[in-house]
Image: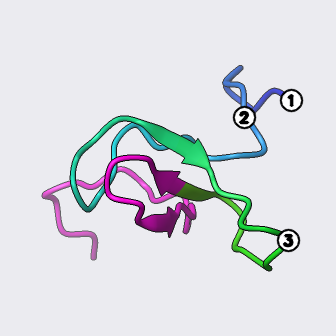
Amino acid sequence: MSGPAGNTSSARAVAFYCPYCGDEDLRPDAADGAALPHGAWRCAACQQAFSLKKLTNTPERTDEVIR
């Protein structure tokens, strides 16, 4: 699927490192049929599970005050 600027989007957000220990050995989490949030990942090093969720696209920030 292609976005408006030619960027490709995927069904799963990709995590590059664990937010708890920093390890890079992450795997999509599918815990025995349990209802997990979309984008769930599990760290092989510390066994923590977490999920990624994109909240919104934000406009570019400027230092200029708009009145």
Asked if labels 1 and 2 touch by Cβ distance under 8 angstroms, the answer is: yes
| Residue depth check, mark 2 versus mark 3: number of the one nearer the observer | 3
Quote the CA–CA distance across marks 2 and 1: 6 Å
Q: Which mark is residue 34?
A: none
Q: Position of residue 36 (x, y in %)?
A: 72, 74
Q: Which mark is residue 9?
A: 2
Q: Position of residue 43 (x, y in %)?
A: 43, 51
Q: Which residue is mark 3?
A: 33
Taking the image as shown, residue 41 lies to the left or right of residue 46, namely: right
Q: Residues within 10 Å of mark 3 (few under 14, many from 20)?
A: few
Quote the CA–CA distance across marks 3 and 1: 28 Å
Taking the image as shown, residue 38 lies to the left or right of residue 2, namely: left
Quote the CA–CA distance across marks 2 and 3: 26 Å
Q: Residues within 10 Å of mark 1 (few under 14, many from 20)?
A: few
Q: Please name the residue shown 41% across and 60% down the image.
A: 47
Q: Amino acid at mark 2?
A: Ser
Per the image, label 1 sits on a secondary structure element best described as loop
Taking the image as shown, residue 11 lies to the left or right of residue 44, namely: right
Label whose residue precedes the other's in the sequence (3 or 1): 1
Image quadrant where residue 6 sits: top right
Q: Amino acid at mark 1?
A: Met
